[in-house]
Amino acid sequence: MFGRSKIISAVLFLAAFLISGNAFAARLKDIAFIDGVRPNQLVGYGLVVGLNGTGDKTSAIYTTQSIANMLNRMGMKFDPKAIRVKNTAAVLVTAELPAFIRPGSKIDVLVSSLGDSTSLQGGTLISTPLKGPDGQVYAVGQGAVALAGFSAGSEKNSVTKNHQTAGKIPSGALIERDVPVMLSGRDDLYLSLRNPDFTTAERISSAINESMHNTVAQPMDAGRIRVVVPYEFKTGIVEYIAKIETLEIRPDNITKVIVNERTGTVVMGENVRLSTVAISHGDISIEIKTQYYISQPPAFSPKGETVVQPVEETTVQEEKSRLIILPESVTLGEVVRALNLVGVTPRDLVAILQAIKAAGALQAELEII
Protein backbone atom coordinates (compact mmCIF):
# COMPACT_ATOMS: atom_id res chain seq x y z
CA MET A 1 0.00 0.00 0.00
CA PHE A 2 1.11 3.56 -0.64
CA GLY A 3 2.11 5.72 2.28
CA ARG A 4 0.06 8.75 3.22
CA SER A 5 2.72 11.18 1.97
CA LYS A 6 2.89 9.37 -1.38
CA ILE A 7 -0.89 9.58 -1.80
CA ILE A 8 -0.88 13.31 -0.98
CA SER A 9 2.00 13.85 -3.38
CA ALA A 10 0.19 12.02 -6.19
CA VAL A 11 -3.07 13.92 -5.68
CA LEU A 12 -1.42 17.33 -5.54
CA PHE A 13 0.81 16.50 -8.52
CA LEU A 14 -2.28 15.58 -10.53
CA ALA A 15 -3.96 18.83 -9.46
CA ALA A 16 -0.87 20.77 -10.50
CA PHE A 17 -0.84 19.03 -13.88
CA LEU A 18 -4.52 19.77 -14.51
CA ILE A 19 -4.22 23.40 -13.39
CA SER A 20 -1.16 24.08 -15.53
CA GLY A 21 -2.70 22.35 -18.56
CA ASN A 22 -6.07 24.11 -18.39
CA ALA A 23 -4.56 27.51 -17.61
CA PHE A 24 -2.41 27.43 -20.78
CA ALA A 25 -5.10 28.86 -23.06
CA ALA A 26 -8.78 29.76 -23.05
CA ARG A 27 -11.13 31.14 -25.64
CA LEU A 28 -11.75 34.87 -25.50
CA LYS A 29 -15.51 34.29 -25.13
CA ASP A 30 -14.84 32.33 -21.92
CA ILE A 31 -12.86 35.07 -20.16
CA ALA A 32 -14.54 38.24 -21.48
CA PHE A 33 -17.88 39.49 -22.77
CA ILE A 34 -19.08 42.42 -24.86
CA ASP A 35 -20.54 45.33 -22.92
CA GLY A 36 -24.32 45.31 -23.15
CA VAL A 37 -24.52 41.62 -24.04
CA ARG A 38 -25.63 40.18 -20.73
CA PRO A 39 -28.68 38.51 -19.13
CA ASN A 40 -31.26 40.35 -17.01
CA GLN A 41 -33.01 39.21 -13.85
CA LEU A 42 -36.80 38.88 -13.73
CA VAL A 43 -39.04 38.44 -10.68
CA GLY A 44 -42.75 38.03 -10.06
CA TYR A 45 -45.30 37.14 -7.38
CA GLY A 46 -47.73 34.31 -8.02
CA LEU A 47 -49.81 31.48 -6.63
CA VAL A 48 -49.25 27.72 -6.81
CA VAL A 49 -52.54 25.80 -6.69
CA GLY A 50 -53.45 22.12 -6.56
CA LEU A 51 -51.45 21.24 -3.45
CA ASN A 52 -52.54 18.32 -1.29
CA GLY A 53 -53.07 20.20 1.96
CA THR A 54 -49.46 21.47 2.06
CA GLY A 55 -50.19 25.08 1.13
CA ASP A 56 -50.05 28.22 3.25
CA LYS A 57 -51.87 28.21 6.57
CA THR A 58 -53.77 31.04 8.29
CA SER A 59 -50.54 32.95 8.99
CA ALA A 60 -50.17 33.85 5.30
CA ILE A 61 -52.79 36.61 4.99
CA TYR A 62 -51.40 37.76 1.65
CA THR A 63 -52.25 34.34 0.18
CA THR A 64 -55.96 34.67 0.87
CA GLN A 65 -55.87 38.29 -0.33
CA SER A 66 -54.24 37.18 -3.59
CA ILE A 67 -56.85 34.47 -4.08
CA ALA A 68 -59.64 36.99 -3.52
CA ASN A 69 -58.08 39.43 -6.00
CA MET A 70 -57.74 36.72 -8.63
CA LEU A 71 -61.35 35.58 -8.20
CA ASN A 72 -62.58 39.18 -8.26
CA ARG A 73 -60.90 39.69 -11.65
CA MET A 74 -62.79 36.63 -12.87
CA GLY A 75 -66.10 38.19 -11.87
CA MET A 76 -66.58 36.49 -8.50
CA LYS A 77 -66.70 38.60 -5.35
CA PHE A 78 -65.09 37.12 -2.23
CA ASP A 79 -64.07 38.47 1.14
CA PRO A 80 -60.43 37.52 1.87
CA LYS A 81 -61.31 36.82 5.51
CA ALA A 82 -63.80 34.16 4.42
CA ILE A 83 -61.24 32.19 2.40
CA ARG A 84 -59.67 29.18 4.13
CA VAL A 85 -57.63 26.97 1.83
CA LYS A 86 -54.66 24.69 2.32
CA ASN A 87 -54.04 23.77 -1.28
CA THR A 88 -52.65 27.14 -2.39
CA ALA A 89 -49.24 28.71 -1.69
CA ALA A 90 -47.88 32.18 -2.37
CA VAL A 91 -44.57 32.03 -4.23
CA LEU A 92 -41.88 34.23 -5.69
CA VAL A 93 -41.01 33.41 -9.28
CA THR A 94 -37.55 34.26 -10.62
CA ALA A 95 -35.98 33.84 -14.05
CA GLU A 96 -33.03 34.99 -16.12
CA LEU A 97 -33.69 36.73 -19.43
CA PRO A 98 -30.82 35.98 -21.84
CA ALA A 99 -29.52 38.56 -24.28
CA PHE A 100 -30.94 38.55 -27.83
CA ILE A 101 -33.87 36.28 -26.90
CA ARG A 102 -37.02 37.15 -28.82
CA PRO A 103 -40.75 37.20 -27.96
CA GLY A 104 -42.28 33.75 -28.27
CA SER A 105 -39.26 31.95 -26.87
CA LYS A 106 -39.41 30.14 -23.53
CA ILE A 107 -37.11 30.17 -20.51
CA ASP A 108 -36.94 28.21 -17.24
CA VAL A 109 -38.33 29.70 -14.04
CA LEU A 110 -37.62 28.99 -10.37
CA VAL A 111 -40.56 28.93 -7.94
CA SER A 112 -39.91 29.47 -4.19
CA SER A 113 -42.43 29.41 -1.37
CA LEU A 114 -43.07 32.76 0.28
CA GLY A 115 -45.28 31.67 3.17
CA ASP A 116 -45.43 28.66 5.49
CA SER A 117 -46.21 26.04 2.86
CA THR A 118 -44.56 22.71 3.66
CA SER A 119 -44.36 21.40 0.09
CA LEU A 120 -45.01 22.50 -3.49
CA GLN A 121 -45.26 18.92 -4.73
CA GLY A 122 -47.97 18.46 -7.34
CA GLY A 123 -48.69 22.19 -7.60
CA THR A 124 -49.28 24.31 -10.68
CA LEU A 125 -48.18 27.91 -11.04
CA ILE A 126 -50.95 30.07 -12.47
CA SER A 127 -50.22 32.92 -14.89
CA THR A 128 -47.59 35.16 -13.26
CA PRO A 129 -46.14 38.32 -14.88
CA LEU A 130 -42.34 38.54 -14.55
CA LYS A 131 -40.94 42.05 -14.38
CA GLY A 132 -37.50 43.54 -14.83
CA PRO A 133 -35.81 46.24 -12.71
CA ASP A 134 -37.58 48.88 -14.83
CA GLY A 135 -41.02 47.57 -13.85
CA GLN A 136 -41.86 46.33 -17.35
CA VAL A 137 -43.30 42.84 -17.92
CA TYR A 138 -40.87 40.79 -20.01
CA ALA A 139 -42.28 37.29 -19.54
CA VAL A 140 -45.26 35.38 -18.14
CA GLY A 141 -44.74 32.19 -16.17
CA GLN A 142 -47.13 29.25 -15.84
CA GLY A 143 -46.93 25.49 -15.55
CA ALA A 144 -46.48 22.46 -13.30
CA VAL A 145 -43.79 22.75 -10.63
CA ALA A 146 -41.11 20.03 -10.76
CA LEU A 147 -39.41 19.08 -7.50
CA ALA A 148 -36.22 17.06 -7.20
CA GLY A 149 -37.58 14.80 -4.47
CA PHE A 150 -40.74 13.78 -2.68
CA SER A 151 -42.64 14.03 0.57
CA ALA A 152 -44.90 11.26 1.91
CA GLY A 153 -46.64 10.29 5.14
CA SER A 154 -48.60 12.13 7.80
CA GLU A 155 -47.65 15.05 10.00
CA LYS A 156 -46.43 12.74 12.78
CA ASN A 157 -44.73 10.20 10.57
CA SER A 158 -43.38 11.46 7.26
CA VAL A 159 -40.49 10.91 4.88
CA THR A 160 -39.01 13.83 2.94
CA LYS A 161 -36.28 13.80 0.33
CA ASN A 162 -34.56 17.00 -0.84
CA HIS A 163 -36.00 20.50 -0.60
CA GLN A 164 -39.77 20.67 -0.99
CA THR A 165 -40.48 24.41 -0.90
CA ALA A 166 -38.66 25.38 -4.09
CA GLY A 167 -39.00 23.92 -7.56
CA LYS A 168 -38.37 24.55 -11.23
CA ILE A 169 -40.62 24.83 -14.26
CA PRO A 170 -38.66 23.93 -17.41
CA SER A 171 -39.61 26.30 -20.24
CA GLY A 172 -42.19 27.70 -17.86
CA ALA A 173 -42.11 31.36 -18.96
CA LEU A 174 -43.10 32.78 -22.33
CA ILE A 175 -41.13 35.83 -23.46
CA GLU A 176 -43.37 38.83 -24.16
CA ARG A 177 -40.76 41.57 -24.60
CA ASP A 178 -37.05 41.59 -25.51
CA VAL A 179 -34.22 43.83 -24.37
CA PRO A 180 -32.87 45.64 -27.44
CA VAL A 181 -29.09 45.42 -27.97
CA MET A 182 -27.84 47.49 -30.90
CA LEU A 183 -24.63 46.18 -32.47
CA SER A 184 -24.91 47.02 -36.14
CA GLY A 185 -23.47 50.36 -37.20
CA ARG A 186 -21.22 50.69 -34.16
CA ASP A 187 -17.73 52.11 -34.59
CA ASP A 188 -16.25 50.23 -31.64
CA LEU A 189 -16.92 47.51 -29.11
CA TYR A 190 -15.88 47.18 -25.48
CA LEU A 191 -14.79 43.88 -23.98
CA SER A 192 -15.16 43.38 -20.22
CA LEU A 193 -13.01 40.77 -18.47
CA ARG A 194 -14.76 38.39 -16.10
CA ASN A 195 -11.66 38.47 -13.87
CA PRO A 196 -9.96 41.85 -14.37
CA ASP A 197 -6.19 41.64 -14.77
CA PHE A 198 -3.72 43.97 -16.49
CA THR A 199 -1.62 41.16 -17.97
CA THR A 200 -4.67 39.37 -19.38
CA ALA A 201 -6.00 42.62 -20.88
CA GLU A 202 -2.69 43.22 -22.63
CA ARG A 203 -2.56 39.66 -23.97
CA ILE A 204 -6.11 39.97 -25.34
CA SER A 205 -5.25 43.23 -27.12
CA SER A 206 -2.11 41.73 -28.63
CA ALA A 207 -3.96 38.63 -29.82
CA ILE A 208 -6.72 40.67 -31.49
CA ASN A 209 -4.25 43.02 -33.18
CA GLU A 210 -2.18 40.10 -34.43
CA SER A 211 -5.27 38.33 -35.75
CA MET A 212 -6.56 41.44 -37.58
CA HIS A 213 -3.06 42.52 -38.73
CA ASN A 214 -3.90 45.98 -37.47
CA THR A 215 -3.98 47.95 -34.23
CA VAL A 216 -7.70 47.76 -33.48
CA ALA A 217 -7.64 46.78 -29.78
CA GLN A 218 -6.42 48.89 -26.90
CA PRO A 219 -6.76 48.09 -23.17
CA MET A 220 -8.46 50.89 -21.23
CA ASP A 221 -7.76 49.38 -17.80
CA ALA A 222 -7.49 45.96 -16.14
CA GLY A 223 -11.09 45.07 -16.92
CA ARG A 224 -11.98 46.82 -20.19
CA ILE A 225 -10.66 46.72 -23.75
CA ARG A 226 -11.74 48.96 -26.63
CA VAL A 227 -11.94 47.22 -30.00
CA VAL A 228 -12.39 49.31 -33.15
CA VAL A 229 -14.66 47.85 -35.83
CA PRO A 230 -12.78 47.92 -39.19
CA TYR A 231 -14.53 49.40 -42.21
CA GLU A 232 -14.90 46.04 -43.94
CA PHE A 233 -16.89 44.71 -40.95
CA LYS A 234 -19.26 47.67 -40.57
CA THR A 235 -22.07 45.67 -42.12
CA GLY A 236 -20.89 42.33 -40.71
CA ILE A 237 -20.53 42.98 -37.00
CA VAL A 238 -21.60 39.41 -36.14
CA GLU A 239 -18.85 37.97 -38.34
CA TYR A 240 -16.33 40.29 -36.70
CA ILE A 241 -17.32 39.24 -33.18
CA ALA A 242 -17.28 35.55 -34.16
CA LYS A 243 -13.76 36.03 -35.54
CA ILE A 244 -12.26 37.50 -32.37
CA GLU A 245 -14.20 35.59 -29.68
CA THR A 246 -12.62 32.26 -30.69
CA LEU A 247 -9.06 33.55 -30.22
CA GLU A 248 -7.15 31.58 -27.58
CA ILE A 249 -5.71 33.64 -24.73
CA ARG A 250 -3.57 32.54 -21.80
CA PRO A 251 -5.19 34.34 -18.84
CA ASP A 252 -3.14 35.54 -15.90
CA ASN A 253 -4.52 35.85 -12.37
CA ILE A 254 -3.38 36.66 -8.87
CA THR A 255 -1.77 33.61 -7.32
CA LYS A 256 -4.01 32.18 -4.63
CA VAL A 257 -3.96 29.37 -2.12
CA ILE A 258 -7.49 28.28 -1.18
CA VAL A 259 -7.82 26.57 2.19
CA ASN A 260 -10.92 24.84 3.57
CA GLU A 261 -10.33 24.31 7.27
CA ARG A 262 -13.43 22.13 7.72
CA THR A 263 -12.40 19.50 5.20
CA GLY A 264 -8.65 20.03 5.13
CA THR A 265 -8.75 20.78 1.40
CA VAL A 266 -5.95 22.92 -0.06
CA VAL A 267 -5.89 24.09 -3.69
CA MET A 268 -2.86 25.99 -4.98
CA GLY A 269 -2.26 27.76 -8.28
CA GLU A 270 0.71 26.99 -10.47
CA ASN A 271 2.61 30.18 -9.59
CA VAL A 272 2.80 29.70 -5.83
CA ARG A 273 6.23 30.69 -4.53
CA LEU A 274 7.90 30.26 -1.17
CA SER A 275 10.71 32.34 0.22
CA THR A 276 13.38 30.53 2.21
CA VAL A 277 11.75 29.32 5.42
CA ALA A 278 12.37 26.73 8.16
CA ILE A 279 9.52 24.52 9.37
CA SER A 280 9.36 22.32 12.47
CA HIS A 281 6.64 19.70 12.46
CA GLY A 282 5.84 17.25 15.24
CA ASP A 283 2.87 15.56 16.91
CA ILE A 284 2.12 14.38 20.44
CA SER A 285 -0.09 11.33 20.86
CA ILE A 286 -1.60 10.62 24.31
CA GLU A 287 -3.24 7.23 24.92
CA ILE A 288 -4.99 6.21 28.14
CA LYS A 289 -5.90 2.57 28.74
CA THR A 290 -7.71 0.97 31.68
CA GLN A 291 -6.94 -2.68 32.40
CA TYR A 292 -8.66 -4.84 35.03
CA TYR A 293 -6.75 -7.29 37.31
CA ILE A 294 -8.48 -10.00 39.39
CA SER A 295 -7.24 -10.54 42.99
CA GLN A 296 -8.21 -13.91 44.58
CA PRO A 297 -7.71 -15.06 48.22
CA PRO A 298 -5.19 -17.88 49.00
CA ALA A 299 -6.36 -21.50 48.75
CA PHE A 300 -8.21 -22.94 51.81
CA SER A 301 -8.41 -19.43 53.28
CA PRO A 302 -11.25 -19.16 55.90
CA LYS A 303 -12.08 -15.64 54.77
CA GLY A 304 -11.59 -13.80 51.56
CA GLU A 305 -13.29 -12.75 48.33
CA THR A 306 -12.39 -12.19 44.74
CA VAL A 307 -11.69 -8.51 43.97
CA VAL A 308 -11.47 -6.79 40.57
CA GLN A 309 -8.88 -3.97 40.66
CA PRO A 310 -8.81 -1.43 37.77
CA VAL A 311 -5.36 -0.15 36.81
CA GLU A 312 -4.98 2.85 34.50
CA GLU A 313 -2.01 3.14 32.18
CA THR A 314 -1.15 6.42 30.50
CA THR A 315 1.22 6.47 27.54
CA VAL A 316 2.54 9.63 25.96
CA GLN A 317 4.19 9.25 22.57
CA GLU A 318 5.81 12.23 20.91
CA GLU A 319 7.02 12.00 17.36
CA LYS A 320 10.42 13.35 16.63
CA SER A 321 10.18 16.95 15.55
CA ARG A 322 11.51 17.42 12.05
CA LEU A 323 13.12 20.74 11.23
CA ILE A 324 13.80 21.29 7.54
CA ILE A 325 14.61 24.32 5.46
CA LEU A 326 12.51 24.95 2.38
CA PRO A 327 14.49 26.91 -0.21
CA GLU A 328 12.78 29.46 -2.41
CA SER A 329 10.43 27.52 -4.70
CA VAL A 330 9.59 28.39 -8.28
CA THR A 331 6.81 25.99 -9.25
CA LEU A 332 3.91 24.31 -7.55
CA GLY A 333 5.57 20.93 -7.94
CA GLU A 334 8.58 22.07 -5.92
CA VAL A 335 6.33 23.47 -3.20
CA VAL A 336 4.45 20.16 -2.95
CA ARG A 337 7.62 18.10 -2.90
CA ALA A 338 9.15 20.35 -0.24
CA LEU A 339 6.08 20.12 2.02
CA ASN A 340 5.89 16.36 1.55
CA LEU A 341 9.43 16.12 2.89
CA VAL A 342 7.90 17.09 6.23
CA GLY A 343 5.40 14.22 5.93
CA VAL A 344 2.33 16.41 6.37
CA THR A 345 -1.32 15.39 6.12
CA PRO A 346 -3.85 17.66 4.37
CA ARG A 347 -5.00 19.13 7.70
CA ASP A 348 -1.39 19.68 8.76
CA LEU A 349 -0.85 21.48 5.48
CA VAL A 350 -3.58 23.98 6.39
CA ALA A 351 -1.82 24.95 9.63
CA ILE A 352 1.60 25.05 7.96
CA LEU A 353 0.41 27.34 5.16
CA GLN A 354 -1.19 29.70 7.66
CA ALA A 355 2.06 29.85 9.61
CA ILE A 356 4.14 30.38 6.45
CA LYS A 357 1.83 33.20 5.36
CA ALA A 358 2.07 34.82 8.79
CA ALA A 359 5.87 34.65 8.51
CA GLY A 360 5.72 36.46 5.15
CA ALA A 361 7.29 33.57 3.25
CA LEU A 362 4.25 32.60 1.16
CA GLN A 363 4.21 34.75 -1.98
CA ALA A 364 0.50 34.23 -2.72
CA GLU A 365 -2.87 35.30 -1.46
CA LEU A 366 -4.14 32.91 1.21
CA GLU A 367 -7.93 32.61 1.17
CA ILE A 368 -9.68 30.59 3.89
CA ILE A 369 -13.21 29.38 3.13
Image (cartoon, rainbow, N blue to C red):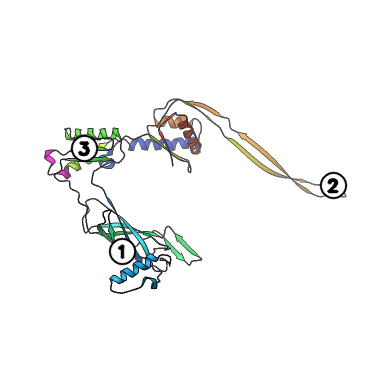
Give 231 or 11, whichever is nearer the viewer.
231
Q: CA distance from mark 3 to mark 2?
A: 103 Å
Q: Which residue is mark 2?
A: 299
Q: Which mark is residue 226?
A: 3
N-terminal label among 3 and 2: 3
Three-letter amino acid code of the residue under disc 2: Ala
Image position of 320 with respect to 151: above or below: above
Residue 315 showing in the rendered view = yes
Q: Of circles 1 and 2, which is in front?
A: 1
Q: Are marks 3 and 2 in contact (CB under 8 Å)?
A: no
Give 208 or 59, whichever is nearer the viewer.
59
N-terminal label among 1 and 3: 1
Q: Is residue 152 left or right of residue 231?
A: right
User: Residue 244: which quarter of the image?
Assistant: top left
Q: CA distance from mark 1 to mark 3?
A: 44 Å
In the rendered image, residue 64, in percent from the top left (x then y), is placed at 37, 68
**Circle 2 SS class:** loop
**Circle 1 SS class:** strand
Image position of 235 with respect to 44: above or below: above
Three-letter amino acid code of the residue under disc 3: Arg
Q: CA distance from mark 1 to mark 2?
A: 89 Å
Q: Of circles 1 and 3, which is in front?
A: 3
In the rendered image, residue 82, in percent from the top left (x then y), is placed at 39, 73
Residue 122 showing in the rendered view = no
- Residue 233 colored magenta? yes
User: Residue 107: which quarter of the image?
Assistant: bottom left
Three-letter amino acid code of the residue under disc 1: Gly
Q: Which mark is residue 353?
A: none
Q: Which residue is mark 1?
A: 143
**Circle 3 SS class:** strand
Magenta part of the protein: which range? 228-239
